[in-house]
């Protein structure tokens, strides 16, 4: 074991989802090692503990995993479980951790592009399988800022591509099939027979794995176990640079899928997932399901799915996510929690059994089966609902709106804005908060306005300043926050929502339904003046 002297880097503070930086930042000598040392010291795992390690296969994944295993040995950890080839989707890693490990290190920058000019990332998940809480990540940042050395073992060469157990001095490495345990978990939750029958009856689907981690998972589950046609999964081979693409499953970046699903030859069902497999997008034939609606539909139909037949203890959504699921929760008579953005905020509620399903507007949905959002799980949930109801995706969503009303919803993103300008927008809004209630915007009266603060109902911890909310008396909302996952400058997100229940107002185009509210939202925050941007970078 070697103790290597080092000096701290000024920027090792984890954000919404771990430490995420441009790849060259991670390639600086000692950069990864410093952070891993801080992370392992804070985790303080006992010698007999098991650590799960895996990543989404992006550029640097393999080298980083070898370094982490050597550092685990150097820090006295006796057992590591690693996905074959260093691969593990984020939800599959969560599941493996929950099978008895003390924690896990996941390498990914999620939906951000990979490669030498792309992004890389690392995060720590605790024994419950979920992202470590802020108290932990803050402590890691403090340790990293004061680090003077790290510990790394010289290990004989080991092969990550061969499944099996390798005994090395001081550490045992189990190289496991990345898919098997996860696929079994999915079989235990969903009605595979019904979905198999659906495919056998000619139902046609396309799954775009975007050259990212879910390829091997989707081929095994959809094509091999459920009998979907060979070739159902496209871009199925994970590549270090995701084939040069941007592995984010939305209408902008999943363009190959979108072209097919909105074209003349559209299939019955389309889906995509992101770099590390935790996000999802669901499409029907020429029909887009917003992530917020997806969560609401899942909640309303959960008892059609074997794993959720007993009903839901409760649901949760992040604050900027539309309130569509709230309406379902009210109808079901179950609690609905509103948490800050970041999957980690669902962890305590899931662990305490207070919620069963949860989701976010950022294309994430999940349940108590793991402690991460789960892209393929959401796809299977939808397939199970379609099979059980015998209706198309569009029919299911329209029926949902007819029952619960429709939450028109859009998000405007302004990426890579200079930090000063972005902070100026937020400061202006904070200044205006107290004068907003009672004022009228686009004919709507502001009922309340605040900077969202969350008190965790389980451990009482408080997370303040989580985004500006402007709430209207008719249920409409405008939300502003700065992204916690960007790697360049600041990203301003503006979320706009309005609720319609009148039956003749359920079929409008979203842009049309929200036009006035969007204009008012941009004006209120002086977005154009302060950022110089006439238009957002992305609209979702
Ligand atoms: C990641 C997190 C999510 C979060 C999303 C957007 O995917 O896991 O919980 O909603 O990033 O975060 P941001 O701070 O960029 O809006
Ligand atoms: Zn992701």
Image: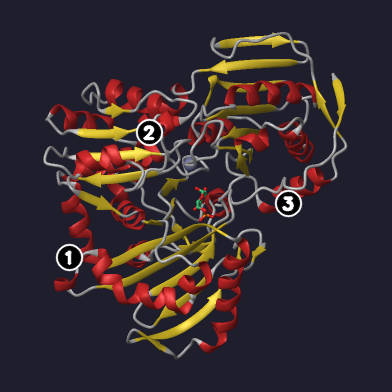
Q: Which numbered disc, 1 or 2, marks the residue that appears first in the sequence?
A: 2
Residue occupying image coordinates x 46% and y 77%: 470
Quadrant (top left/top right/bottom left/bottom right) for the N terminus:
top right
In this view, the residue farthest toward the bottom is 438
Q: Nearer the viewer, residue 437 or 58?
A: 58
- Residue 523: image location, x then y, percent: 43, 78
Discs 1/2, front: 2
Q: Is mark 1 within 8 Å of ligand 1?
A: no
Residue 536 visible? The answer is yes
Q: Which residue is mark 2?
A: 210
Q: In the displayed structure, does residue 176 sit left or right of residue 77? A: left
Residue occupying image coordinates x 15% and y 39%: 266
| Image quadrant where residue 40 sits | top right
Mark 1 surroundings: few (<14), some (14-19) or many (≥20) residues within 10 A: few
Quadrant (top left/top right/bottom left/bottom right) for the C terminus:
bottom left
- Residue 192: image location, x then y, percent: 28, 30
Q: Which residue is mark 3?
A: 138
Cα separation, mark 1 vs mark 3, equals: 46 Å
**Contact check, label 1 and label 3, Cβ < 8 Å:** no
Question: Quick one: SS at disc 3?
Answer: helix
Q: Which numbered disc, 2 or 3, marks the residue that appears first in the sequence?
A: 3
Cα separation, mark 1 vs mark 2, equals: 31 Å
Question: Quick one: SS at disc 2?
Answer: loop
- Residue 373: image location, x then y, percent: 47, 44
Judge whether 169 appears above or below 48 on screen: above
Instruction: Give the number of the disc on residue 507.
Output: 1
Residue occupying image coordinates x 59% and y 60%: 418
Q: Which numbered disc, 1 or 3, marks the residue that appears first in the sequence?
A: 3
Residue occupying image coordinates x 41% and y 29%: 243
């Amino acid at each position: 074991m070697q103790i290597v002297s080092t000096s701290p880097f000024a920027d090792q503070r984890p954000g919404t989802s771990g430490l995420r930086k441009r790849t060259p930042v991670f390639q600086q000598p000692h950069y990864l090692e410093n952070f891993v040392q801080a992370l392992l010291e804070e985790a303080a795992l006992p010698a007999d503990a098991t650590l799960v390690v895996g990543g989404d296969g992006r550029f640097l994944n393999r080298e980083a995993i070898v370094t982490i295993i050597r550092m685990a040995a150097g820090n006295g950890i006796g057992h590591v479980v690693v996905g074959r080839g260093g691969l593990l989707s984020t939800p599959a890693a969560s599941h493996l951790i929950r099978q008895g490990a003390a924690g896990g290190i996941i390498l990914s920058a999620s939906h951000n592009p990979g490669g030498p000019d792309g992004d890389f990332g690392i995060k720590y998940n605790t024994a419950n399988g979920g992202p470590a809480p802020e108290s932990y990540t803050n402590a890691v940042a403090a340790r990293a800022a004061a680090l003077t050395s790290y510990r790394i073992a010289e290990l004989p060469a080991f092969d990550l591509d061969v499944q099996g157990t390798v005994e090395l001095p001081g550490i045992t490495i189990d190289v496991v099939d990345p898919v098997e345990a996860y696929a079994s978990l999915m079989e235990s939750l969903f009605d595979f027979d019904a979905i198999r029958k659906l495919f056998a009856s000619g139902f046609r689907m396309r799954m775009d794995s975007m050259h990212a981690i879910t390829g091997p998972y989707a081929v095994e589950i959809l094509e091999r176990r459920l009998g979907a046609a060979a070739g159902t999964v496209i871009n199925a081979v994970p590549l270090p640079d995701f084939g040069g693409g941007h592995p984010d499953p939305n209408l902008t970046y999943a363009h190959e899928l979108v072209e097919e699903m909105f074209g003349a030859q559209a299939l019955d069902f389309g889906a995509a997932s992101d770099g590390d497999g935790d996000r999802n997008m669901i499409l029907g034939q020429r029909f887009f399901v917003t992530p917020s609606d997806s969560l609401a539909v899942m909640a309303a139909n959960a008892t059609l799915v074997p794993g959720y037949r007993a009903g839901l203890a409760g649901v949760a959504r992040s604050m900027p996510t539309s309130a569509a699921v709230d309406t379902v929760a009210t109808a079901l008579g179950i609690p609905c929690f509103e948490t800050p953005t970041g999957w980690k905020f669902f962890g305590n509620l899931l662990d305490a059994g207070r919620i069963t399903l949860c989701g976010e507007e950022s294309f994430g949905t999940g349940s108590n089966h793991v402690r991460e959002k789960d892209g393929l799980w959401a796809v299977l949930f939808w397939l199970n609902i379609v099979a059980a109801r015998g209706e198309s995706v569009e029919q299911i969503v329209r029926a949902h709106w007819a029952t619960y009303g429709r939450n028109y919803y859009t998000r405007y993103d302004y990426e890579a804005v200079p930090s000063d300008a972005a902070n100026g927008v937020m400061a202006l809004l904070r200044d205006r908060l107290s004068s907003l209630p009672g004022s009228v915007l686009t004919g709507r009266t502001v009922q309340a306005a605040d900077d969202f603060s969350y008190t965790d109902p389980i451990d009482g911890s408080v997370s303040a300043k989580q985004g500006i909310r402007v709430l209207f008396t008719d249920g409409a909302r405008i939300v502003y926050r700065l992204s916690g996952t960007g790697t360049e400058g600041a990203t301003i997100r503006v979320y706009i929502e309005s609720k319609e229940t009148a039956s003749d107002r359920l079929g409008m185009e979203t842009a049309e339904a929200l036009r006035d509210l969007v204009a008012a939202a941009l004006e209120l925050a002086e977005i154009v003046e302060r950022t110089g941007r006439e238009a957002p970078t992305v609209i979702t």
